[in-house]
Image (tube, rainbow, N blue to C red):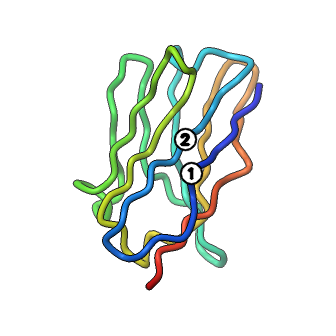
Amino acid sequence: VQLVESGGGLVQPGGSLRLSCAASGFSLGGYYMFWFRQDPGKERELVASISSAGVAIIYPDSVKGRFTISRDNSKNTLYLQMNNLKPEDSAMYYCGTLIPQGDYWGQGTQVTVSS
């Protein structure tokens, strides 16, 4: 089982990024998938989840209306579309899942929002 995030980078405030999380070793469409973020010195924050039925939830009020979680089962990939990014969105973003074999996380992708 492996999760590999990509798509992070440096973006100006107001910009957009789409993070990807490529899964291998299992079919992500059958399980809950999550996006978390963590800034150094802060607690890890749950950003979004999507169920096997496709029910998507964005958790922090600060990103509602700006972030969207989705997945492409044919590509076995999870996405996080982030629009109108703000400096406070800067963090390492991780995807994760809980499957019968255990919980798994990727290595993270860094998002930095700065002018």
Point 51% across, 59% down: residue: 45
How packed mark 1 is, by other alpha carbons closer than 10 Å (few <14, some 14-19, many 20 or more), is some
Marking on residue 72: none
- State the residue position of label 2: 20
Percent x, y for residue 105?
70, 41
Percent x, y for residue 109?
64, 56
Rendered view: 59 above or below 95: below
What secondary structure is marked by label 2?
A: strand
Quadrant assignment for the C terminus = bottom left
- State left or right for residue 89 relative to residue 76: left
Point 51% across, 14% down: residue: 74
What secondary structure is marked by label 1?
A: loop
The quadrant where residue 21 appears: top right
Rendered view: 76 above or below 114: above
How packed mark 2 is, by other alpha carbons closer than 10 Å (few <14, some 14-19, many 20 or more), is many
Point 33% across, 52% down: residue: 67
- State the residue position of label 1: 7
